[in-house]
Image (tube, rainbow, N blue to C red):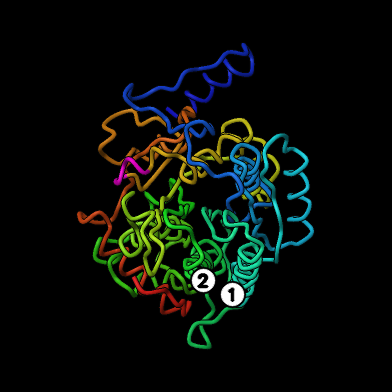
């Protein structure tokens, strides 16, 4: 199915120069990310991790150019981030948005996460003192950065067990970052967590996925029962579920004064994207991916929609977006192949494959407890 579809699409688009319409359920309509159909975001702050390249770069660029936001590029390399900011700002026309860099962020270092968060808080405080209300709190946090190769982290658990570099970069660093920044978020802020089709393949029984030990072992190098990439992507979904349970709120809570801002979290699958995440793969594989995978501009659309779309507020069950049409029953999780190499359709609300019959609630609670224990994150009261 997948290769036949892409061969057909490639023939039409690259040889004949024609567009192939999306296939699948005719009732499905992708969420619009056009400025005319999204929230008023001019001058408001967004943070995008891993935004010097790939999907993160395109996400940051869209938020600046199309939606007028001030986007803080959260990246490990100062030089690469400053170059990315210049490229985004040079591409900006009439929008009042801008890309800025404050401080390096290395998600594989909890100390780096805390230092970066302190710089963001200082920046927001200065904006408030200068009377720039729109830029004094965070409207959007996109936890985008990730890696697909594992190894031992320099961070230790219980002083002697190294954390897994992949799982820490993909999940634990973002967990701590979100905790550090939650109190300076705007009521109604969006927290976007990058999941993947690989959340379908986490493995383990339902009982295991509801166990704190399972998620603790995923975080420890060499202790995960499977490759840590899939658990890290299921964890992104569970993180959104638990964030909404603890700190979420409907439209009626947005303007009310709460001890902790009410937020909305959504997990997204960008699709099978020919991004820089494959940079360490052999050249011939990267060339193949260029033929069958979607590009970064398409891959960022689920993240942008989760960050800006008004329609998300109208659907309390919208927890997961992915960019391919669901060919059969949209009320059921998609067959994994349809979330990997199907024709690109745009950001669609889709039912994810959650590990239990309770919409993932027990697994989400177990993930949260393990992550809290390992990171020492200080969450505000609910």
User: How far across and down, in percent of the image, does residue 20 sit?
Assistant: 50, 17
Tell me what residue is drawn at x 45 percent, y 60 percent.
Answer: 232
Callout 1 environment at 10 Å: few (<14), some (14 to 19), or many (20+)?
many
Q: Secondary structure at mark 2?
A: helix
Quadrant including the N terminus: top left
Q: Quadrant of residue 109?
A: bottom right
User: How far across and down, in percent of the image, does residue 357 sit?
Assistant: 20, 54
Q: Circle 1 sits on which residue?
A: 114
Which of the two labelled residues, at mark 1 and mark 2, occupies the earlier sequence position? 1
Quadrant including the C terminus: bottom left
Reply yes or no: does residue 277 show up in magenta.
Answer: no
Q: Secondary structure at mark 1?
A: helix
Indicate left or right for 3 with 28 as reference: right
Which residue is at the front of the view, 192 or 182? Answer: 182
User: How far across and down, in percent of the image, does residue 37 sit?
Assistant: 47, 32
Q: Circle 2 sits on which residue?
A: 180
Q: What's the distance in space between the residues labelled 1 and 2, CA to CA?
A: 7 Å
Q: What segment carries the magenta color?
A: 313-317
Q: Is residue 6 above or below residue 210?
A: above
């Amino acid at each position: 199915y997948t290769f036949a579809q892409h061969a057909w699409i490639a023939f039409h688009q690259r040889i004949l120069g024609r567009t192939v319409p999306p296939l699948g359920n005719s009732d499905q309509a992708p969420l619009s990310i056009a400025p005319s159909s999204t929230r008023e975001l001019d001058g408001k702050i967004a943070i995008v991790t891993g935004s010097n390249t790939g999907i993160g770069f395109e996400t940051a660029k869209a938020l600046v150019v199309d939606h007028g936001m001030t986007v803080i590029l959260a990246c490990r390399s100062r030089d690469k981030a400053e170059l990315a900011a210049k490229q985004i700002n040079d591409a900006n026309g009439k929008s009042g948005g801008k890309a800025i860099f404050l401080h390096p962020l290395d998600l594989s270092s909890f100390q780096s996460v805390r230092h970066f968060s302190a710089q963001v808080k200082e920046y927001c405080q200065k904006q408030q003192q200068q009377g720039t209300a729109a830029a004094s709190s965070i409207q959007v946090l996109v936890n985008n950065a990730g890696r697909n190769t594992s190894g031992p982290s320099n961070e230790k658990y219980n002083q002697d067990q190294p954390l897994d570099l992949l799982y820490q970069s993909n999940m634990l660093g973002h967990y701590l970052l979100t905790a550090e920044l939650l109190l300076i978020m705007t009521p109604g802020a969006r927290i976007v967590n990058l999941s993947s089709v690989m959340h379908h393949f986490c493995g383990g029984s339902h009982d295991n996925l509801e166990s704190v030990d399972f998620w603790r072992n995923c975080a420890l190098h060499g202790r995960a029962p499977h490759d840590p990439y899939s658990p890290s992507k299921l964890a992104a979904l569970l993180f959104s579920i638990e964030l909404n349970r603890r700190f979420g709120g409907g439209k009626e809570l947005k303007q009310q004064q709460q001890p902790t801002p009410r937020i909305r979290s959504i997990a997204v699958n960008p699709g099978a994207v020919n991004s820089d995440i494959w940079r360490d793969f052999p050249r011939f594989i990267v060339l193949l991916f260029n033929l069958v995978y979607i590009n970064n501009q398409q891959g960022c659309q689920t993240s942008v929609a989760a960050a800006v779309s008004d329609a998300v507020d109208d659907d309390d069950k919208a927890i997961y977006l992915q960019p391919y049409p669901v060919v059969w029953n949209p009320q059921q999780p998609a067959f994994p192949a349809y979330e990997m190499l199907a024709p690109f359709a745009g950001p669609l609300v889709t039912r994810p494959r959650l590990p239990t019959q309770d919409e993932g609630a027990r697994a989400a609670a177990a993930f949260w407890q393990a992550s809290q224990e390992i990171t020492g994150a200080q969450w505000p009261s609910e």
